[in-house]
Image: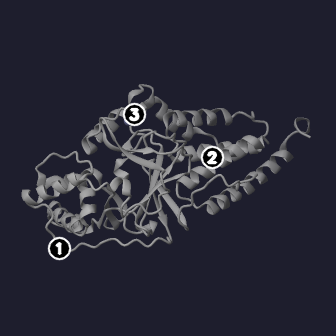
Amino acid sequence: MDLNDGRMRVQPPAGATYSTHNGLRVEKVFERDPLEVEVRGPRGSGFPTCPETAATLLKLISQRTQAWRQRITNTVGTPEAVYVIQETPSDGMRMFANKDLECGDLIIQENPIVLFPLEHVLSSKSPQRQLWLTLQNALDGLDEVARAVYMELPNIHEGDASELALGIFMTNKFEVYSTDDASDHSDRSKVSAAVFKDIPRMNHSCSPNVVRYWCATSRSMYVYAIRPILEGSPIVTAYCDPFLPTHERRDLLLNAYGISCVCPACTDSASDANRARIQNIQDNLAAVIQWALTPTLPDDLLLVPSLELLKLIEEEGLEGTEYYARVLKVLWYIYFVLEDFGAAGFYGRMLRAWKTANGVKKSDAIKEMQSDLELIQYTVNRRRMLTPRKGRE
Ligand SMILES: [Zn+2]
């Protein structure tokens, strides 16, 4: 089987390993990254502490800068013209695909405008005030254009103009690790806050069409297409765990982001049951090796639930979750055992594209799959030996 047919065009940085939590919140870890990115350190303070300063900054915003189109400072490895940010009638400035995209295509690699460790904030006796001071310092270190870009980001928190910067921060911040060492990721003191220029322009959907991950070494967030996205379609990411029931997602999104989600999952009354069924099938899918080594079991014993699982995941738009990778792997395996190499190759290529979209270097993805293939081939050989003669050669 050819795992190296050159379909994937985008390479993440070298040395990727990864961990996943919350279904879609996939934070990736890199041992090494060739990108050297200067991040301005804090110096001084003085961001809008009084209405006059805030008013001056608001004026800056109205100058507009055209920064969205100029891709200033922060988009490092984004292929040209992959996305555009456009005004929408109801949602402000939003990100759209500027060409047809396939699973595994890099949409954006972006450094934050603002990035600082949360350690001092979290350990402070007055975290709110400490956050305010730290944010002021960070913003004071920005040049005029970057500051104007920051002040244009969405803000769902009401308040006077002097609170604007904090409201923007609360609306748009991502919590990211300040280290790539996965063993430190349970340590809250290793968490930083990051605010990006373009990434917040991805709208939320409970059926996201991208996955994103953070690389601490290059201090950048990567966003990859996780299924085909047609030119002109919105690029959407999940701000919460898509496996939460609709009413819980609704409360969470409204409270945290001011979003009333009207995505297909939130408006389809069957979606909760479908999502529960995805988890249920996954949990009850029998061991594929055991099936392969028991030729007396029906050929379609695992194929039927696996194909149902695949269909449900695709209908629910949950290709970004680990469930999708698992079912692709099972299908790749099953078809190989059944000696339908065309179908096996199809699902194998999809699995490799998924891995690439999730930050696994192409050569590592191929290595992983070659090792899986050895196990499959061993199983196939054992199965042939166990199969009654009349059934096979
Ligand atoms: Zn939704």
Q: Nearer the viewer, mark 1 or mark 2?
A: 1
Q: Type of residue at label 1? A: Gly
Pointer 1: residues within 10 angstroms few (<14), some, or many (20+)? few
Is residue 268 in sight in this rendering? yes
**Residue closest to the eye, 37 or 170:** 37
Q: Quadrant of residue 312?
A: top right
Residue 309 horizontal side relative to residue 193, left or right: right
Please give the name of the residue rendered at 27% of the width and 44% of the height, measured from the top-left corner: 257
Instruction: Return the residue at label 3.
Output: 263
Residues marked 1 and 2 touching at CB (< 8 Å): no
Q: CA distance from mark 2 to mark 3?
A: 25 Å
Q: Quadrant of residue 181?
A: bottom left
Instruction: Return the residue at label 2.
Output: 350
**Dot 3 lies on which element?**
loop
Instruction: Return the residue at label 1.
Output: 44
Whether residue 33 is situated above or below residue 87 in the rendered picture: below
Q: Nearer the viewer, mark 1 or mark 3?
A: 1
Q: Type of residue at label 3? A: Cys
**Some atom of ligand 1 lies within 8 Å of the CB belonging to the residue at label 3:** yes
Residue 216 on image: x %, y %:
41, 67
Residue 293 horizontal side relative to residue 241, left or right: right
Residue 294 horizontal side relative to residue 111, left or right: right
